Image (cartoon, grey):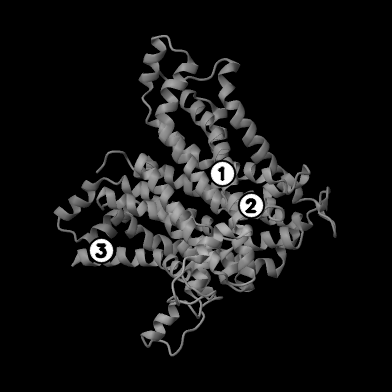
Amino acid sequence: MKRQSPGRAADYLPLAFPAAMLTLFFVVPFGTMVAVSFFRRVQGSFYEPAFVLDNYARFLSIFFGSVLGFSILLAAMVALICVSVGLPFTYLLSRLPRRLQVGWLVGLLAILSLSEVIIGFAWSTLFSRTAGISNLFAELGLLSAPVSLTPGFGAVLTGMVYQAFPYTVLVLYAPVARLDPSLAEAARTLGASPMRAFFNLIVPTLRNAIVATVILVFVFALGSYLLPQILGRPQHWTLSVLITDQAIYQSNLPFAAAMAIFLVLVSLALVGLALLLVRRAAV
Amino acid sequence: MARWWRRLFFFAVALFLAAPIVVVAAVSLNRQKTLTFPPHGLSLAWYGDVFADPEWRSALFASLLIAVSAAALAVATAFPLAWFNWRRKSRLGRVFQVLATTPFILPPVISALGFLSFWATIGVYGAPWTVVVSHAMFLVTLPLVTLTLGFASLDREIVEAATTMGANERLILRTIILPLMLPYILSGYAFVFVLSLNEYIVAYMVVGFTVETLPIKIFNSLRYGYTPTMAGVTVLFAAAAAAVFTLVARFGDLPRLLGAWAGRD
């Protein structure tokens, strides 16, 4: 049986339900958001239909610029840390016996699915003065007394790396696991150390997949909205936090929507680039 | 030598990943209502609170109900789409396939805001069922991916043989495709279930003021300071996620589901 092009209208029947659901509850909401981003905000109620560019003009403020800059910097740091640790990790993981691999994958999936609230809470506990790791450092004599490590930039960064690391490994897992094992063997036979084989052979072979992963993790980190609030101070707030804040607390849905559209455009452009790289790698 | 470095590396990563959960688990055993580690006195009382305290219990039930229904709706949406794309070569089918993968790749706050503006515009903002639909659409990518992989492993000749022997489409679907796809349906369901249970931002934006799901409840109580019940919930959630994915791994091929080739031991 070959895949056939649908001929009769009845052939399209299975598509009806998913198409209706996705159109009504994803495409239309998205369109609504685009429309709202041009609406005018009304104090005291939600908004009124209009076509104004005010919401986009607010991007030009220094405050918005600094939040955007901080978000990009933070997400880039998270992506670089995650991929530079995640790549050798995934490589070694894919060489473990299958049972162990599955065990790790289960653990990584479980952590990936953990709510941001829970991750934030867990790290704020670990960084707290009364129950945190600083107690351990104090015991060891590295610190004179336990201190609180949160809120702070380090705490935000750690929490976000924790959140993004399982994602990084799972994105890298497919290309790394599909690598031909005879590649590394050949390098070993020719006398290269495992380290050298990794850097001179594996990394260049996976170059496109690695760049694609950096981009995907960057976009993933851009989406973090609770960790900067739980583990950081207001100056550590990212664009995602700002969008939530404007939508819920300031009841300024049009401005929130405009920022979201901006975030969509940035993310889509980056994801498109990542897909292009993956496709080129696959050829 | 190299082996020891490798072990050390795995150990360090495991420590990093496990440390927060371990500390929270230990803290949750404190007898007093304090945030201290190591715990003072051991007690499991706070776990009982998750079920006994009416507020935590209702949050737990709300979350479970949402997750169960959203996962069903997501699978019901993804299955016909994956099936259609397996049988037919159609541009329209491709368009919806791509469309269904976008919510998962984009930062979640975008989908959340899209749902919020949509439900607010049509005037049902805050209705509890809206979060079920929102979660289903937000997470539909996962069953779609597992089912697309599943169909890719399905031998087309089985279907062809059945057709030759006179089986109609309905019979083929019921006796061949559904049974063979069951592991992929279940793992897709499990992914949506666990992620919906943990999801915060979409639930918060869509029904944050009318329904309190567990993640919303945890965040709201965090603002008023620490309670040991949160620690209990955290441990239960981590354990539940690990249990669900262990089941998925037991009944399916996890490395394959995650994109590695099958049968490469």
Answer yes or no: do the residues labelled 2 and 1 have beta carbons within 8 Å? no
Disc 3 and disc 1: Cα gap in Å?
37 Å
Disc 2 and disc 1: Cα gap in Å?
18 Å
Q: Nearer the viewer, residue B108 or A97?
A: A97
Name the residue: 35% across, 64% down. B13
Residue located beneath label 2 in the image: B203
Residue located beneath label 1 in the image: B102
Q: Which amino acid does label 2 sit on?
A: Ala
Q: Residue B68: give x, y in percent of width and height.
A: 55, 42
Q: Which amino acid does label 3 sit on?
A: Arg
Name the residue: 45% across, 34% down. B148
Q: Is residue A23 visible?
A: yes
Q: In this view, does A60 lie to the left or right of B75?
A: right
Give the foreground label among 3 and 1: 3
First along the sequence among labels 3 and 1: 3
Question: Which quadrant does the N terminus of chain B fall into?
Answer: bottom left
